[in-house]
Image (spheres, grey):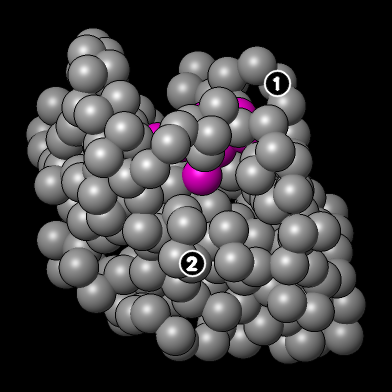
Amino acid sequence: MIFRQLFHRESSTYSYLLGDDTTRQALLIDPVLEKTQETLSLINQLGLTLALAIDTHTHADHITGLGALRDQTNCKTMMGIQTLADCVSAAFSDGDLIDIGDIHLEVIYSPGHTDDSYSFYASKQGILFTGDTLLIRGTGRTDFQNGDANAQYDSLFQRLLTLPEDTVVYPGHDYKGWTSSTIREEREHNPRLQLADKNTYVAFMTNLQLPSPTLMDIAVPANQACGKLPAQ
């Protein structure tokens, strides 16, 4: 498998490019609009054809590249069935499989950060793309877009953390420059996963009192339109 981890500095967002060695088809997870041309250049340099672009959830801190990529490559675009973005080509739901050549991603519904949050598990490669549900030494905030700390706790402890301990975790963001972790590392060292029980976790997340993302009022409606700004 061809694999690249891409970074958008302004929002500390990670995008992930996965390419199949045989078919030369590629999948892109959480593309950023500002990085569209740079990403397409990389795809071309690697001799790949973009077949599918997907978002883990409706982002509030950057504008998605889904629409721009589809316009320029005719790739398919997908989000979870809970999304309000009716511009995607198709929707996935919990338990679905996304196949690109010999790359097979298991779709895991992992709400909590938002109500349309998903993670993607490639069991053959032992890698997990967690979006904003599980971060390195943290978890995604739960105070907007129908976020729910109770649901996030269940997503973490009943779904993601039940995967093999050596599974490599690739998050949707990192603000310290860390690029990956493992299920074992997060179980042992993520302070939010050390909280005593669900009630303690929910109380902690409820009292974070974080400021709203700077681009939230622009990004959310734009992302519900697959990256098209309201004025366009």
Residue at screen point 20% across, 46% down: 148
Q: Position of residue 86 (x, y in %)?
A: 16, 68
Instruction: For mark 1, give the secondary structure.
Output: loop
**Residue 40 lies in the magenta stretch:** no
Q: Is residue 71 visible?
A: no
Residues at discs 1 and 2 in contact (Cβ within 8 Å): no
Q: Position of residue 20 (x, y in %)?
A: 80, 77
Q: Which residues make up the magenta segment?
A: 134-140
Residue at screen point 59% across, 66% down: 162
Q: Is residue 45 left or right of residue 115?
A: right
Q: Quadrant of the C terminus?
A: top left
Q: Is residue 65 left or right of residue 141?
A: right
Residue at screen point 81% across, 59% down: 166
From the image, state whether disc 1 or disc 2 is nearer to you. 2
Would you name the residue on which mark 1 appears?
A: 177
Q: Between 90 and 134, which is closer to the camera in this rendering?
A: 134
Would you name the residue on which mark 2 appears?
A: 159
User: Mark 2 is on which residue type?
Assistant: Arg
Instruction: Classify 126 as above or below 25.
Output: above
User: Mark 1 is on which residue type?
Assistant: Gly
Please tell me which of labels 1 and 2 falls first in the chain.
2
Q: Quadrant of the N terminus?
A: bottom right
Residue at screen point 32% across, 45% down: 198
Q: Between 132 and 31, which is closer to the camera in this rendering?
A: 132
Q: Is residue 22 left or right of residue 34?
A: right
Q: Quadrant of residue 111?
A: bottom left
Q: Which of the numbered marks, if any, corresponds to residue 51?
A: none
3D distance between C-alphas at marks 1 and 2? 26 Å
Instruction: For mark 2, give the secondary structure.
Output: helix
Residue most extreme to the front: 196
